[in-house]
Image (cartoon, rainbow, N blue to C red):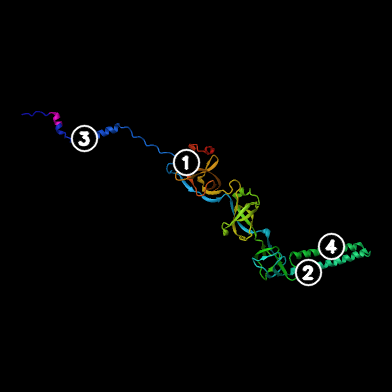
Amino acid sequence: MMRPASHPMTQLTASTPRRSPGMQWASTVMLWAVLLSACSPEAPPKAPEPGPSIQGTTVRFPGRPEGIRSEVALDAGTTALTIPGRLAWDEDRTVRVHSPFAGRVIKPLVQVGDTVRAGQPLAELVSSEFGQAVADTRRAETDLTLADDNLGRQRELHDAGLVPLKDLRAAQAEHSRAEIEAQRARTRLRQTGSTGTGNYSLRAPISGVVVERTMNPGQELRPDQEGAALFVVTDPSRLWAWLDAPERTLPKLSAMPTGTSLRIRSAAWGDTEFEGQLVRKEDAIDPELRTFRLRASVGNAQRKLKSGMFVTATFPAPGESAGMKVEHVPLSAVILMDGQRHVFVQNDDNSFTRQQVQVIAEQAGRASVTGIKPGERVVTEGNLYLQQILSRNGGSVAAARSEARP
């Protein structure tokens, strides 16, 4: 007996498993979610971050900018020119004493540091040359006396008609020669400062202080003897300061006339200043040190300064920049705008202001400038970026000037 064939639909239904109501609900939710996401509009874009604000020559960022670096400006003093030097005796008030005669020292009469007056004996010497000078002076004076007597006698005889005129003229000539010789001998002896009696006394030619002595008892002396002076007498109330100015300072110093006031400082006296005046400027440059010398006169009434002491001399800077503070900044911090030099000064983490400066000197990657305050931070990286921001907003130097006008 044959079985009737099954309907195809009946077979499909029988072979497909039935879904539970929960699974059907989850599938429906997922389908609606896909349809809603496909039909919904796009999400709105994020609002752009606010850019930097400009006020005059100041750039302010909403947050701390990246790529901008700054450095503290270092105090470099003032625009006044400072030159090193060394003190020495004032040669206009200093005498180096030598013996005019050969001889031997009996005893020195003064020590280093003693104050002497003009004409005071410094040492006692025994000298045959001095004795000869005394003898020559006495002989010349004796010859002058004889010549004077002879001239008087010849004049009387001539007036009486007893001698011819030629004898009177010969007596006059002899008297003139004797007078000249006596004057020469007296002058030589007077220059030695001696009275012509006893041993020879070496005397101080000026009043001052004995600062050097190279004489010892028993020492043999000669007028042509080489070496240091026997005594150095000076007035220490005024000294010379020899200053070694670098060649690069010549343009500034050439404008300073002699008589320009300057201030002298020494490490021994700290901030104490001594007044001085520029006396002379040398014309030659040292070929090795590349410096030229200046000479200044320094008052030393209290005798605090000593010869040989190292000092610094400060000259006032001429022109409008006199006395202005100078700061050392990296050379990279300085930019050129419209023929003028500028730096960007950091006000805080987000604010920077362009400031005009004057470059005093450049050396070893750093610049000495005026126009900023000590301790301010200057931008060393990113200053060109800041300038571009100002330029895009009309922040050129000319625009800043127009804004500053009332």
**Label of residue 25 in the image:** 3
Going from N to C along the chain, the mark reached first, 4 or 3, is: 3
Q: Is residue 323 left or right of residue 389?
A: right
Q: Residue at x 46, y 43 (%)?
A: 351
Q: Residues within 10 Å of mark 1 (few under 14, many from 20)?
A: many
For the residues labelled 3 and 1, the Cα–Cα distance comes to 61 Å
Nearer-the-camera pick, 1 or 56: 56
Q: Earlier in the sequence, mark 2 or mark 4?
A: 2
Looking at marks 2 and 3 on the same chain, the residue that comes earlier in the sequence is marked by 3
Q: Quadrant of residue 48?
A: top left
Q: Which residue is mark 1?
A: 59
Query: Looking at the rendering, in which quadrant would you find the C terminus?
Result: top right
Query: Label 4, label 3: how many angstroms apart (C-alpha)?
Result: 158 Å
Assess whether mark 1 and mark 3 are in contact (beta carbons under 8 angstroms).
no
Cα separation, mark 2 vs mark 4, equals 20 Å
Circles 2, 3 touching at the beta carbon (< 8 Å): no
Query: Reading the chain from its start, which is encountered first: label 1 or label 4?
Result: 1
Q: Is residue 75 visible?
A: yes
Question: 10 Å neighbourhood of mark 3: few (<14), some, or many (≥20)?
Answer: few
Instruction: Give amino acid for label 3.
Output: Trp
- Dot 3 falls on a residue whose secondary structure is helix
Residue 6 vs residue 293, the one in the foreground? 293
**Residue 392, image x and y in percent?**
48, 37
How crowded pointer 2 is (Cα within 10 Å; few <14, some 14-19, many 20+) is rated as some
Segment colored magenta? 7-12
